[in-house]
């Protein structure tokens, strides 16, 4: 069976980063760069007890695949994986994992950062924070849009 | 029929996740559909007129107006905050 070089998973279950990274490895890969995002204990000075993640089934998966395809067109990528959790997550739990394998580290570093920056500004996910003082939907950050804009081609 | 989905804060503010509307000619454009929804009374008008609302047709973001047909799926949602 030919393994899909570009894998996307949206899931409620936790993920095991070691297994994901091992699955990404192949003989031609000289570098694997990975990013793991976690639920922070506080945000904008407010204490967080849990984070709730919502997505748009179908569109979110397609959006992530399009981001991986674009990364593979712009850089030399052997394989790439995005795993994103949804549902209720506790502080300290991993939320998102991006892994990119390449022959050399430069392309792996760059493509991984590109995928995260576009995931944060394009893929339909929404975060709701639960804290001691109540719940609130997070607002999009201008700094995230700025980061994504850096990758725009002239 | 036309399916209209709402997500996150918009879904909660409208207390509505999904509308399945029998097809009408006034739903023939995205702007026309939105105007019809805004006329459902409050909170629909205020929620759908909020700035930065994102609109998608058949699971692709649309930044201007768009032609709609029976069977299309439209979504309204706030700016995304994943990762």
Image (spheres, coloured by chain):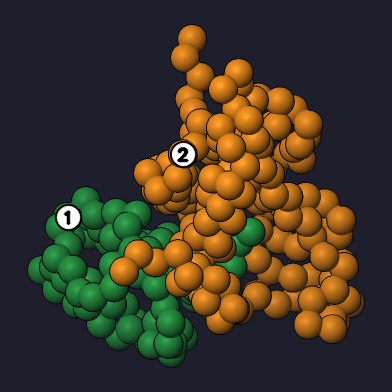
Chain colours: A orange, B green
Q: Residue furthest top?
A: A1
- Which residue in the structure is indicated by mark 1? B70
Q: Residue at x 43, y 82 (%)?
A: B52
- Which residue in the structure is indicated by mark 2? A76
Tell me if mark 2 has few (under 14), some (14-19) or many (20+) residues whose alpha carbon lies within 10 angstroms of its own.
some
The subunit carrying tag 2 is A
Q: Is residue A29 above or below residue A145?
A: above
Cα–Cα gap, marks 2 and 1: 42 Å
Secondary structure under the numbered disc 1 in the rendered image: loop
Q: Quadrant of residue A133?
A: bottom right
As rendered, which of B51 and B18 lies closer to the eye? Answer: B51
Secondary structure under the numbered disc 2 in the rendered image: loop
The subunit carrying tag 1 is B
**Residue A70, position as x, y percentages in the image:** 39, 48
Q: Residue at x 70, y 32 (%)?
A: A21
Q: Is residue A82 left or right of residue B37?
A: right
Q: Is residue A123 left or right of residue A32?
A: left
**Residue A131, position as x, y percentages in the image:** 84, 74
Q: Is residue A87 above or below residue B11?
A: above
**Residue A122, position as x, y percentages in the image:** 46, 62
Foreground: disc 2 or disc 1: 2
């Amino acid at each position: 069976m030919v393994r899909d070089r570009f894998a996307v998973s949206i899931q409620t279950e936790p993920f095991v980063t070691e297994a994901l990274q091992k699955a990404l490895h192949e003989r031609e890969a000289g570098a694997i760069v990975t990013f793991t995002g976690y639920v922070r204990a506080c945000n904008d000075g407010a204490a967080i007890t849990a984070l709730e993640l919502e997505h748009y089934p179908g569109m979110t998966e397609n959006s992530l695949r399009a981001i991986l395809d674009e990364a593979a067109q712009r850089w030399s990528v052997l394989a790439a994986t995005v795993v994103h959790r949804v549902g209720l997550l506790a502080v300290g739990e991993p939320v998102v994992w991006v892994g990119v394998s390449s022959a050399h580290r430069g392309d792996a570093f760059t493509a991984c950062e590109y995928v995260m920056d576009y995931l944060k500004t394009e893929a339909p996910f929404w975060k709701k924070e639960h804290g001691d003082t109540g719940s609130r939907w997070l607002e999009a950050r201008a700094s995230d849009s700025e980061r994504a804009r850096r990758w725009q081609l002239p | 029929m036309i399916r209209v989905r709402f997500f996150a804060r918009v879904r909660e503010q409208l207390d509505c996740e999904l509308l399945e509307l029998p097809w009408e000619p006034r739903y023939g454009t995205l702007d026309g559909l939105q105007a019809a929804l805004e006329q459902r009374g409050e909170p629909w008008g205020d929620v759908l007129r909020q700035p930065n609302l994102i609109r998608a047709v058949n699971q692709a973001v649309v930044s201007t107006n768009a032609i709609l047909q029976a069977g299309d799926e439209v979504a309204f949602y706030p700016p995304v905050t994943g990762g």
